[in-house]
Image (tube, rainbow, N blue to C red):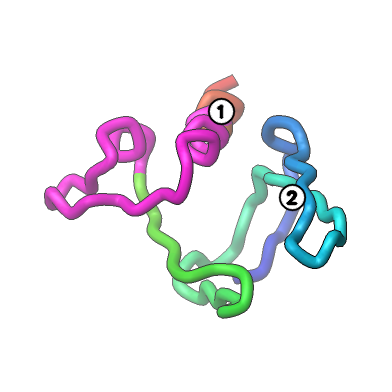
């Protein structure tokens, strides 16, 4: 997936320390993309992705009933904040 345009930062950066002692920051972005069918993830950073709507995120399930695996409540909150930003 090629990000065509970075629209905005979503939420605040998440800064944390790795076991090695290295301090890193994680940023979340709202982006526009050209081709949603060509997503390629870095296996060292991500396990999976899914395209879902706001209601599915709120329910934690796809319309098919399949559970959506999101790692933390804070990530769910950021995703929902992104949906709100798009509405504005």
Which residue has dot 2 on it? 26
User: In which quarter of the view is residue 56 placed?
Assistant: top left
Query: Which of 31 and 80 lies nearest the eye of the viewer?
Result: 80
In the rendered image, residue 40 lying in the magenta stretch gets the answer: no
Q: Residue at x 74, y 53 (%)?
A: 5
Marks 2,1: beta carbons within 8 A? no
Give the label on residue 50, or none: none
Q: Quadrant of the C terminus?
A: top right
In the rendered image, residue 74 lying in the magenta stretch gets the answer: yes
User: In which quarter of the view is residue 22 placed?
Assistant: bottom right
Circle 2 crowding by C-alpha within 10 Å: few under 14, some 14–19, many from 20: few
Q: Residue at x 35, y 38 (%)?
A: 57
Q: Residue at x 60, y 27 (%)?
A: 85
Looking at the image, which residue sits at the far top? Answer: 88
Which residue has dot 1 on it? 81
Circle 1 crowding by C-alpha within 10 Å: few under 14, some 14–19, many from 20: some
Q: Secondary structure at mark 1?
A: helix
Tell me how many marks there are: 2
Q: Which span of residues is magenta-colored? A: 53-81
Q: Quadrant of the N terminus?
A: bottom right
Q: Residue at x 53, y 24 (%)?
A: 84
Query: Which of 29 and 16 lies nearest the eye of the viewer?
Result: 16
Residue 80 in the image, given as x and y percentages of width and height: 48, 31
Q: Nearer the viewer, mark 2 or mark 1?
A: 2
Residue 21, compared with residue 53, is above or below; it is below
- Mark nearer the N terminus (2 vs 1): 2
42 lies left or right of 50: right
1 lies left or right of 49: right
Query: Which of 31 and 59 lies nearest the eye of the viewer?
Result: 59
32 lies left or right of 50: right
């Amino acid at each position: 997936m090629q990000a065509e345009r970075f629209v905005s930062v979503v939420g605040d950066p998440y800064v944390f320390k790795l076991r090695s002692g290295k301090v890193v920051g994680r940023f979340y972005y709202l982006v526009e993309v050209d081709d949603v069918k060509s997503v390629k993830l870095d296996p060292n950073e991500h396990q999976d992705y899914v395209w879902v709507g706001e209601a599915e995120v709120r329910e934690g399930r796809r319309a098919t009933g399949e559970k959506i695996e999101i790692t933390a409540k804070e990530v769910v909150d950021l995703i929902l904040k992104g949906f709100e930003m798009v509405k504005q």
